Image: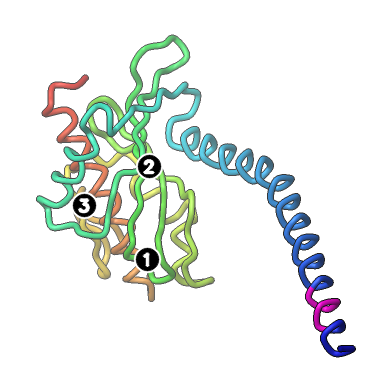
Amino acid sequence: MKNGSSIVKNTIILVIMTLILGTILGSVHYITEEPIAAQEQKEHDEALEAVMPGCTFETVDLQGEGLADTFAAAIADVGLTAESVDEMNIAADASGAPAGYVFSITTKEGYGGEITFTLGLTEEGTITGISFLSISETAGLGMRADTDAFKGQFADRTSEFLSYTKTGARSEDEIDALSGSTVTTNAIVNGVNAGLVSFKAYKEGGNS
């Protein structure tokens, strides 16, 4: 009988502890959820600003406009299978005039997992730059992608499709690969190409 009472007592204590821990965890999640969301939004806005300085941005409803399928088809048509356009923003300059577009792109080909970045393009399709939203490549190797030396190679490119080389870029459509980080280079170049073909599809669809 004593053992039975002990079991009941221990069970009640365990239930109470579980409820208390659940309440604490729920409170922590509630308290941290808003700051985390605010930080993510700040990083998102900074990535837009980095490739289109001084602009304001209007997010396009890709699903509502039917562009999600258009972009996916354009990306698949050039043989890319691990890249996607997550978001597109229309940029306007300080006077309100059209300045270009910013594509948020994810590539799943990174050595350390998914890489997400913004790609800025003028109205004519010239690349204004790239800025990383998420990248977890190897320190000292793939993470060198997040340096001005590497990212700066993309700025002012007018090609509709890029490639990379290990022997020194010699043409408008070539990017110098990161030494010892071909996988990372390939992932980012493919991501940029996904944005370029999506931009082309958007323009060919009669959008301006």
In the rendered view, would you say 41 is above or below 84?
above
Between label 3 and label 2, give the one nearer the viewer. 2
Q: Residue furthest top?
A: 95
- Report the front residue among 168 and 2: 2
Residue at the disc numbered 3? 162
Crowdedness of circle 3 by 10 Å Cα count: few (<14), some, many (20+)? some
Q: Residue at x 20, y 59 (%)?
A: 81
Q: What residue type is disc 2 on?
A: Ser
Residue 13 image offset from top left, x and y in percent:
84, 72
Q: Residue at x 18, y 57 (%)?
A: 80
Q: Quadrant of the C terminus?
A: top left
Q: Mark 1 or 2 closer to N-term?
A: 2
- Report the front residue among 33 and 138: 33
Q: Is residue 9 left or right of residue 74?
A: right
Q: Is the stretch drawn in magenta largely helix, strand or loop? A: helix
Q: Mark 3 or 2 closer to N-term?
A: 2
Cα separation, mark 3 vs mark 2, equals: 18 Å
Q: What residue type is disc 1 on?
A: Gly
Residue at the disc numbered 2? 104
CB within 8 Å, label 1 to label 3: no
Q: What residue type is disc 3 on?
A: Leu
Q: Quadrant of the N terminus?
A: bottom right
Cα separation, mark 1 vs mark 3, equals: 17 Å
Q: Secondary structure at mark 1?
A: strand
In the rendered view, would you say 92 is above or below 36?
above
Labels in figure, total: 3
Residue 56 image offset from top left, x and y in percent:
47, 21
Residue at the disc numbered 1? 110
The range drawn in magenta is 7-11
Cα separation, mark 1 vs mark 2, equals: 16 Å
